[in-house]
Amino acid sequence: MTDDTFSLFRVLAIITWIGVPLYAAIVRGRLYAIFSAVILTFALPSSLILHSRLREFLSADLTPLLDLVFVYSMAAAGIQLAHLVRARMRGSIFRWLISVPAQTFIAGGMLATPWLILLLPIRLLLGWLSWETALSAWTLVEALPVLVAILSIATSMTTRFETVRFRLSQQGPDKIQRVPVERFRGRDPEPLLDRPLRVVQLTDTHLGPWQSVSRLHDRITQLVSREPDLVLLTGDFLTMESMGSPGCLEEALAPLAPIADRCAAIFGNHDHEAPDHVRDAMRNVGIQLLIDDEACFQTPIGSVQIVGADYVNKGRRAHLDELLRRFPRRHEHLRLLLLHDPSAFHAVPEDEVDLVLSGHTHGGQIGLVSLGIDWTVLSGTRWPDQGLFARGASRLYVHRGTGFYGFPLRVGVPAEFSILEISPI
């Protein structure tokens, strides 16, 4: 039975590896076929290698269980990727029995590939020295990405409320650099002497397998109960599943309807894949969608001007120069810019805005933020990953996002569920 199950895993891997991209190419088109082929090519070889090595390491009593776990995970991955060919939102049973194990399996394989390559010289050395016991134990080190993927389910599913406090300024460094904020997690801080601007930012909600409509609806309801002055939505609301389910975004955003006159939104990059879906949801809930446009609000701390930039991939400097010239700073208004991709902060004219709010990076998605360390895989790159950054008189706040898309897990970078308390200049 064990050998049959072992063979079944390899057969399922080959069928999925070849069959899903072929099915996608016939039914959906070349783009998703290429995407699925790349994902599988990056994840499956390491999964096959780890499966074989773990079978050699474990006792004969545990091998059948290992085989069943790998067979089930491989079958779930094949079903999940095939389902995305005709994607739509699914119920909780499908999400928990198929989507979650499938994406955990794929994430583990994707993490394992570079890890196995990095550790290969040590394996070759141990083999050359014929240190069989050490070589067998080394398998546990090689299998760490699988454990990381499993543990990251909790990071991907859970959130803890935060209050984030920072102060704007008329001066700052010449080059973009991280500056500190005050974060209060799981507790309410003492009120400030001077009333701050209270902002809820929603970004990268990515309705899909890890973010159901009811889950996002409940999160927004909790945030609205905090009585924010403004709710600002900075793009990327959908995934392939939710793009195939018209009306789901409107249902999720429904708690914003009673305070829609305090809300504004922009497009992210993925919103251009289903613009009518997003436009309809915003219109029906009553939220102003700012596509290279502005809106002004009266708040308890005074007048606020919000300029919303559409997502563009090229010509960002010219795009932002023209946008901010068209909507110049208003007298005695706090000036905010909604800009989905924080890397475009490099192209924002110096000192033209007080605060930029961005998302897009999912906080870096892989890092050590859960440990209280501001390091992610994006640290040191041109993408500000999460938190507050300064350049001159302008500040940039990068929200970690509510969901995620693409790489199928958050690893050490939890979603953000916060209210920003911003002390003006």
Image (spheres, rainbow, N blue to C red):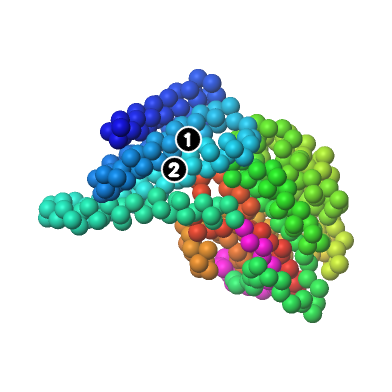
Q: Amino acid at mark 2?
A: Phe
Q: Which mark is residue 49?
A: none
Q: Main secondary structure of the magenta part?
A: loop
The amino acid beneath tag 1 is: Ala
Say whether residue 41 is left or right of residue 336: left
Work out which residue is located at the far front of the displayed protein and give it: 61
Residue 378 in the image, given as x and y percentages of width and height: 49, 57
- Tag 2 and tag 1, C-beta contact below 8 Å: yes
**Residue in view at x 73 percent, y 68 percent:** 421
Residue of label 2: 105
Is residue 311 in view from this perspective? no
* Residue neighbourhood size for the residue with mark 1, other residues' Cα within 10 Å, grouped as few (<14), some (14–19), many (≥20): many
| Residue depicted at 47% across the width and 55% down the height | 151
Residue 76, numbered circle:
1
**Is 14 positioned to the left or the right of 340 in the image?**
left
- In the picture, the quarter occupied by the C terminus is bottom right
Q: Tell me the magenta residue range.
A: 159-178
User: In what element is the residue under mark 1?
Assistant: helix
